[in-house]
Amino acid sequence: MVYNIEKRKMPLVDAHIHLSDPQYGDHLNEVIADAKAFGVSALVTNSVDFRSCQNDIKLAQTYPDLVYPALGIHPWNVNYLKQDELQETIDFILQQNQKNRVIAIGEIGLDPTYETRWEQQVLVFDKMLQLAEQLCLPVIIHSRGTTDKIVDMLQSYNVKHVLLHWFSHTMETLNKAIDLDYFITEGPPTVYSNSIRDIIKQAPITNVLPETDGPVLYRKKPFNGQLTKPSYVKEVLQTVAEIKNLPFCDVVDQIAKNFENFFNIKLSNTV
């Protein structure tokens, strides 16, 4: 199926990227230029530790109305937390939120791959969720191998909105998450992974957002290990349109509405 996307200016979004990752480093101008060239109106840059929280705020100030920071501590970085870094991160998020600079708490979560400090992971996750409650902010959650556990845990918290990043769990868990009105993100694997395509087929379009998770590399066609760029979301949404048997423009418009409702952001070039 061929899509003519040139007839109207459509707001594309990347709901999960890591612009402060060192792999982007010298390529950051290229990534920003790619977003602008392909009509990507919003990049939600997810922090993973105190340093990236600080840098993501700087990026949001450098690229207003394009880069939006989600601040938090990734479960992987729990292994490397310095003394007082958790509290420093919480204090920083509180300060930035007072200036209306934070759109979500993320990327936070649990991951048994990093189970060497499991109790500390649970502690940090709890602190981040309490912070989201306090600030009435959405959460962006890493749940590899822990989705069932997290979906059950979250019902004990009063969080505003929940986004399960790179959802890849069972249909039973997906249905439970959708019943709770949680959102999921899917990225470039949507183009080539049958299991992810099945999730997209099952999930209501009103609960889906696209991501790249850059700088994660995708080695299968059509991405072939190239530097991951925001423009990849266009191919993701083209595939979503095919799976859902919907016009591409309708999918893009609905995704834009999802983004605005979830993050409470008005896209700068929405039509």
Image (cartoon, grey):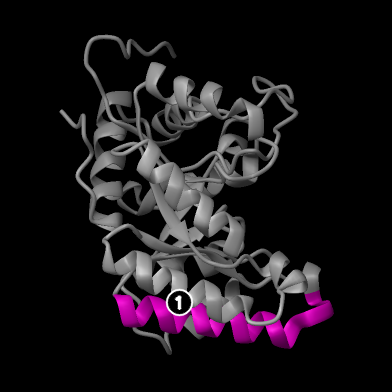
> Amino acid under label 1?
Asp
- The secondary structure type at the circle numbered 1 is helix
User: Which residues lie in the magenta part?
Assistant: 115-135
Q: Main SS of the magenta segment?
A: helix
Q: Is residue 266 left or right of residue 199?
A: left
Q: Looking at the picture, does residue 183 appear above or below residue 158?
A: above
* Figure quadrant of the N terminus: top left
Looking at the image, which is closer to me, 261 or 26? 26
Q: Looking at the picture, does residue 58 appear above or below residue 262?
A: above
In the rendered image, residue 134, in percent from the top left (x then y), is placed at 33, 82
The image quarter containing residue 224 is top right
* Figure quadrant of the C terminus: top left
Residue appearing at x 57%, y 46% in the figure: 18
Q: Is residue 161 visible?
A: no
Q: Is residue 265 left or right of residue 181?
A: left
Residue appearing at x 57%, y 52% in the figure: 166
